[in-house]
Image (spheres, grey):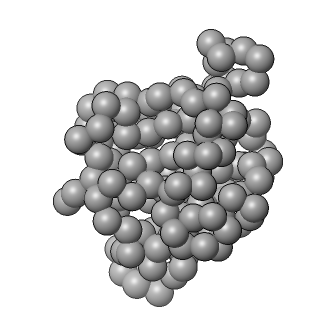
Amino acid sequence: MLKGVDPVLNAELLYALMLMGHGDQLVLCDVNHPAHTIALHTSYGRLIDVSGCGLERVAEAVLKLFPLDTFVAAPVKRMQIVDDPDGHLPIFDTMQAVVDRAEGRRVPIEALERFAFYEAAKQSFAIIRTSDMGPYGCFIFSKGVV
């Protein structure tokens, strides 16, 4: 155990965060996301599981260490609701509040169609699967600089 490190951040997750550079992307997802399959395509090459924690808690812990990219229009992306691209779920508001709090400003979040999200996730550095039951708890964070 280390002092000052949120216990939600296990050793593998900390290692992956340390390997990432600016512009690399990190996926946080719920249990419904095909995370293992997509993780095989990422730079990290395998899934990082954070069992027993929901999206909000993991995002809060990660964003204490992970600066969001200020050189892109929307440093956070989320999955659109299938057949309802303008649809809205409470998890969208929750994650908006988490990222805004972490950055101390309003952070743009871009919605991606389901299969476009999967393709973007394949291009990410790593995928973290939470125990959140979802649905649509799928977010991509672009890393900035400290």
Vertical position of residue 14 compared to residue 72: above or below: below
Instruction: Please identify the quarter of the rendering in which residue 47 is found.
Output: bottom right
* Relative image position of residue 16 (x, y in whole percent): 47, 73
* Relative image position of residue 105 (x, y in whole percent): 27, 32
Vertical position of residue 14 compared to residue 143: above or below: below
Total number of numbered labels?
Answer: 0
Depth check, front residue: 82 or 137: 82
Q: Is residue 76 visible?
A: yes
Q: Is residue 28 visible?
A: no
Instruction: Please identify the quarter of the rendering in which residue 18 is found.
Output: bottom left
Q: In this image, 50 relative to 17: left or right?
A: right
Q: Which residue corresponds to the image point at 38% horizontal and 68% vertical from the top-left?
A: 20
- Furthest residue in direction left, as rendered: 146
Vertical position of residue 122 compared to residue 49: above or below: above
Vertical position of residue 92 compared to residue 18: above or below: above
Q: Which residue corresponds to the image point at 31% horizontal and 31% vertical from the top-left?
A: 73
* Relative image position of residue 84 (x, y in whole percent): 72, 15
Q: In this image, 25 relative to 137: left or right?
A: left
Q: Which residue corresponds to the image point at 36% horizontal and 80% vertical from the top-left?
A: 3
- Furthest residue in direction bottom, as rendered: 1
Depth check, front residue: 137 or 122: 122
Q: Quadrant of the C terminus?
A: bottom left
Q: Which residue corresponds to the image point at 63% horizontal and 64% vertical from the top-left?
A: 41
